[in-house]
Image (cartoon, rainbow, N blue to C red):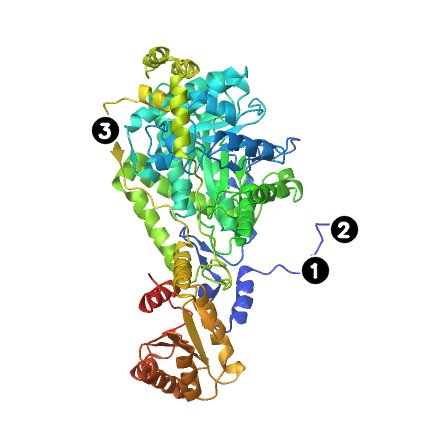
């Protein structure tokens, strides 16, 4: 078979010929309205892409392993595997529990320890000084080297890489980890992964920092300088997109704001005497991966290309232009309702991450929105990415999406729009000044509002939540990771009692930003017994005021519909039954089934019990049955031709017998006809363009479901 002559007997149609054929199948409908797709990023997607769409793209001939690293950092022909680290987040509040989970999962396919700290530790606070509700909240509670000795027992950190978001000021956490390594006689030069500070992410998530940003940058400079000499394989600067993604931002916003933050960090460290070659190897980017498969692939590929261009503008070498990317599947897309569907969401998101070429990956457990993952949900999540690697063999291909006309075109479109937004941020004085002015927050709120509106209208479908709800489901009540605060307070007091306070005080007095060996001194203080909180207070200046900014609102897309279902569940618990809707199905099945199915689905997503077992031949029978059912809402279902006869009669009869009943019709009658129906007693109509969420919320309020 000769590939040069294969299919030569078939002529290649032009785009105009293809479009003409496509328009014939639309039977007069608008080509643009039916076949063009507009994304939240402001990109219009075509139904078909051709070779000529990518011929003029500058990056199309980029080689794997070469700048701008669009196709990854592995050179073509290399025998090196394109394998990523399996970096599942380990959620445990107690160090001993963390150790048990970590050792169990490392033996079963996990390759990187992903440590999530609790809010107190993230803020650099000891249990005694932190808010009690922040101790053990959503992560591991640590304050001493002994906590890490327990957490890492029988785990060799020379062999197992780490991924730790160390909060806005990462130096104390890194000091505890290095102290543990010294205690175990391990070599810091073999420490791999990331123990990174990300002050901007914490700032925009919480809306405040208790100290000036320059102090955070001073700490970042010290950890970066130390790591470049003593732990060159360790990243100490973390740049996360999660706050923007989890607030509802689009891919362009997420990437532009992350790149602007990266530039903010680079600029701050250059001002503190580090070189671009010292800084960039210590930077770790982290992205959330959403459900738009190809958009997410393009986002990751564009990130590599744009970051290389930015570092090149600083005069960075080709090696310095390489980007390291960690990814986690989206928290924003996950649901409490029908949680098993999250397995599929996480799988498609993980696929995008791998196709895009990430270096490490967390796949969220299907029950992430409900509770801390258990052994089963951790195993399924872990095995999802192991299957992508070992059964789908995606690690054997460099840039598997590369060469696709659609993906290459989309990568270029994303990169172009990201660069425009990035330059806007730079014109505003950089990311911090843009955040202080509230511009990124406003832009993200705008997109989040559009996404929420589309979900409410069910243009954006959330399977199991705003579409295809399981009416028999009893959703689980969310629970948080927690620990006994009293237990941690007692452990903290015990730690303080068994260490010489004079020795610790002397060690803490030596800690200041003007010391070149600050981290080494901090490690000595830890070995003397100093705690996380003591290190933080000793190093951070006390004469600076806290800084504030409008925070981003972290949420999930499905929350509004989940609230409707929760209210219906609470109503059932109080009254003994769910709120009811009666369907007055008029005529034979062929007349009413389509709209009865629509109405059943419409109300099921709000937790209503839909009564649709009967069908009626007369309006009188339908009205009597509706009243007898006791349902506070009746929906008339039939075809348009039957409505002029049935709707007024049913509405009048129901209102006469039970005037408080809400009577609706399924469908959208013409304005004059709808007005006539309302004059006869009809309250309103529900149809495919209805704001499903608002209608259901109003109805719940009207009939007393909202307690």
Q: Which quadrant is the C terminus positioned in?
A: bottom left
- Return the residue nearer the eye: 298 or 94: 94
Query: Does residue 518 lie above or below 655 as drawn?
Result: above
State the count of labels. 3
x, y percent for residue 135? 39, 34
- Return the residue nearer the eye: 241 or 661: 661
- Return the residue nearer the eye: 15 or 392: 392
Q: Is 150 left or right of 122, judged from the image as shown? A: right
Instruction: Answer with the quarter of the image where residue 522 lies.
Output: top left
Instruction: Identify the residue at the far right of this view.
Output: 1
Q: Residue at x 49, y 85 (%)?
A: 587
Q: Which residue is mark 1?
A: 9
> What SS does tag 3 mark?
loop
Q: How far is the residue under mark 3 from the one under mark 1? A: 76 Å
Circle nearer the N terminus (2, 1): 2
Query: Does residue 689 lie above or below 197 as drawn?
Result: below
Circle nearer the N terminus (2, 3): 2
Q: Which residue is mark 3?
A: 545
Q: Mark 1 packing: few (<14 Cα in 10 Å), some, or many (20+)?
A: few
Q: Residue at x 35, y 68 (%)?
A: 699
> What SS does tag 2 mark?
loop
> What SS does tag 1 mark?
loop
| Residue 499 seen anywhere in this rendered image of the structure | yes
Q: Is 353 left or right of 265, judged from the image as shown? A: right
x, y percent for residue 38? 43, 57
Q: Which mark is residue 1?
A: 2
Q: Mark 2 packing: few (<14 Cα in 10 Å), some, or many (20+)?
A: few
Circle nearer the N terminus (3, 1): 1
Query: Does residue 518 lie above or below 110 as drawn?
Result: above
x, y percent for residue 187? 54, 16
């Amino acid at each position: 078979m000769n590939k040069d002559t294969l299919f030569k007997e078939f002529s290649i149609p032009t785009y105009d010929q293809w479009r003409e054929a496509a328009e014939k199948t639309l039977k007069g409908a608008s080509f643009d309205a039916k076949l063009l797709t507009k994304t939240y990023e402001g990109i219009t997607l075509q139904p078909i892409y051709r070779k000529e769409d990518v011929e003029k793209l500058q990056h199309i001939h980029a080689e794997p392993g070469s700048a701008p690293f669009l196709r990854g950092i592995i050179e073509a022909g290399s025998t090196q595997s394109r394998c990523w680290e399996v970096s599942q987040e380990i959620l445990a509040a107690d160090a001993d529990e963390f150790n048990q989970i970590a050792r169990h999962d490392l033996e079963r396919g996990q390759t990187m320890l992903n440590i999530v700290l609790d809010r107190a530790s993230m803020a650099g606070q000891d249990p005694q000084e932190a808010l009690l509700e922040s101790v053990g909240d959503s992560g591991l509670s640590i304050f001493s080297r002994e906590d890490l000795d327990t957490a890492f027992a029988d785990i060799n950190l020379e062999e197992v890489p780490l991924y730790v978001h160390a909060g806005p000021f990462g130096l104390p956490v890194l000091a505890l980890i290095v102290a543990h390594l010294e205690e175990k006689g391990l070599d810091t030069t073999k420490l791999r992964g990331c123990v990174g500070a990300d002050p901007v992410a914490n700032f925009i998530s919480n809306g405040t920092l208790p100290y000036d940003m320059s102090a955070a940058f001073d700490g970042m400079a010290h950890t970066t300088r130390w790591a470049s000499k003593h732990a060159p394989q360790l990243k100490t600067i973390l740049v996360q997109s999660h706050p923007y993604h989890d607030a509802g931002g689009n891919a362009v916003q997420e990437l532009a704001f992350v790149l602007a933050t990266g530039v903010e960090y680079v600029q701050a460290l250059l001002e503190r005497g580090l070189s671009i070659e010292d800084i960039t190897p210590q930077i770790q980017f982290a992205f959330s991966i959403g459900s738009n498969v190809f958009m997410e692939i393009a986002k990751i590929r564009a990130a590599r290309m744009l970051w290389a261009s930015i570092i090149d503008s600083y005069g960075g070498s080709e090696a310095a232009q390489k980007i390291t990317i960690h990814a986690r599947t989206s928290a924003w897309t996950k649901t409490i309702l029908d949680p098993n569907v999250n397995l599929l969401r996480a799988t498609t998101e993980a696929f995008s991450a791998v196709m895009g070429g990430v270096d490490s990956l967390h796949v969220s457990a299907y029950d992430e929105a409900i509770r801390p993952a258990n052994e089963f949900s951790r195993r399924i999540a872990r095995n999802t990415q192991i299957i992508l690697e070992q059964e789908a063999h995606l690690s054997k291909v460099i840039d598997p999406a590369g060469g696709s006309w659609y993906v290459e075109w989309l990568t270029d479109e994303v990169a172009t729009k990201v660069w425009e937004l990035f330059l806007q941020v730079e014109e505003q004085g950089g990311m911090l000044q843009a955040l202080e002015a509230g511009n990124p927050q406003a832009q993200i709120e705008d997109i989040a509002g559009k996404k929420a509106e589309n979900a409410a209208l069910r243009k954006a479908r959330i399977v199991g939540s705003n579409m295809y709800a399981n009416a028999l489901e009893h959703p689980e009540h969310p629970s948080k990771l927690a620990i006994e605060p009293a237990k941690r307070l007692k452990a903290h007091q015990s730690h303080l009692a068994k260490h010489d306070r004079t020795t610790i005080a002397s060690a803490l007095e030596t800690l200041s930003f003007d010391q070149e060996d600050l981290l080494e001194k901090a490690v000595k203080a830890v070995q003397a017994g100093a705690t996380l909180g003591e290190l933080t207070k000793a190093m951070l200046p006390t004469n600076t005021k806290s800084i504030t900014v409008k925070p981003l609102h972290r949420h999930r897309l499905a929350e509004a519909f989940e609230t409707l279902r929760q209210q219906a569940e609470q109503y059932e618990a109080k009254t003994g039954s769910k709120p009811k809707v009666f369907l007055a199905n008029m005529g034979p099945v062929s007349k009413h089934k389509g709209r009865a199915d629509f109405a059943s689905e419409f109300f099921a997503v709000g937790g209503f019990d839909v009564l649709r077992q009967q069908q009626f031949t007369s309006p009188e029978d339908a009205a009597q049955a509706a009243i007898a059912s006791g349902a506070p809402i009746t929906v008339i279902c039939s075809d348009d031709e039957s409505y002029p006869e049935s709707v007024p009669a049913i509405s009048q009869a129901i209102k006469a017998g039970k005037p408080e009943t809400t009577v609706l019709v399924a469908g959208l009658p013409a304005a004059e006809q709808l007005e006539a129906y309302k004059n006869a007693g009809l309250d309103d109509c529900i149809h495919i363009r209805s704001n499903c969420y608002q209608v259901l919320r109003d109805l719940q309020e009207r009939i007393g479901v909202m307690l």
